[in-house]
Image (tube, rainbow, N blue to C red):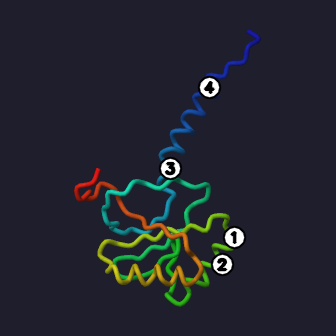
Amino acid sequence: MADINITPFVDVMLVLLIIFMVAAPMLTVGVPVELPNTAASAMPTEQEEPLAITVTADGRLMLQNSEVAEGELIPRLSAVAAERTSKKIFLRADGAVPYERVAQIMGALNAGGFNSIGLVTDTDGPTFGGN
């Protein structure tokens, strides 16, 4: 038989595809917060991993997975953003965090030159009569 049998190759590729499909969602930012539920739809995904700032329930600031002091947030964020192509920042805040705290962080980000800020929430929240 002179033909090449590609069935084992296809089987291995399908198994790897399934493994990566299951593992990919687990590779996102891992700071546990209870995000508020909204009726907003998801934003389109980008090529790079999103740059995320998280405010935990006890008020700590996290840049990606590492804790950062308030005074160091903008300098460290500027250093990280200088090496990236996308200037979008995702702000994740626990639902128990007061709105004032979230607004202060957004204001500091804006004053630091970061104008493209996305708020991260969970879906299936109230629609208040909308579709």
**Residue type at the position of mark 2:** Ala
Tell me whether circle 1 and circle 2 mark residues in contact (CB < 8 Å).
Answer: yes
- Tell me which residue sits at (54%, 69%) in the image: 116
Residue 1 in picture, x, y percent from top left: 73, 9
**Marks 3 and 1, how far apart at CA:** 26 Å
In this picture, residue 47 sits left or right of residue 44:
right
**Marks 1 and 4, how far apart at CA:** 41 Å
- Tell me which residue sits at (38%, 83%) in the image: 101
Q: Secondary structure at mark 1?
A: loop
Residue 8 tag number: 4
Does label 2 or label 4 sit earlier along the sequence? 4
**Marks 2 and 4, how far apart at CA:** 47 Å
**Residue type at the position of mark 4:** Pro
Does label 1 or label 4 sit earlier along the sequence? 4
Residue 63 in picture, x, y percent from top left: 52, 75
Residue matched to label 3? 23
**Residue type at the position of mark 3:** Ala
User: Of discs 2 and 3, which sits in the foreground?
Assistant: 2
Residue matched to label 1? 83
Residue 17 in picture, x, y percent from top left: 55, 39
**Residue type at the position of mark 1:** Glu
Tell me the crowding category of disc 3: few under 14, some 14 to 19, or many 20 or more residues within 10 angstroms, Cα based. Answer: few
The one nearer the camera, 70 or 7, is 70
The one nearer the camera, 114 or 76, is 114
Furthest residue toward front: 130
**Marks 1 and 2, how far apart at CA:** 7 Å
On the image, which quarter does residue 11 sit in? top right
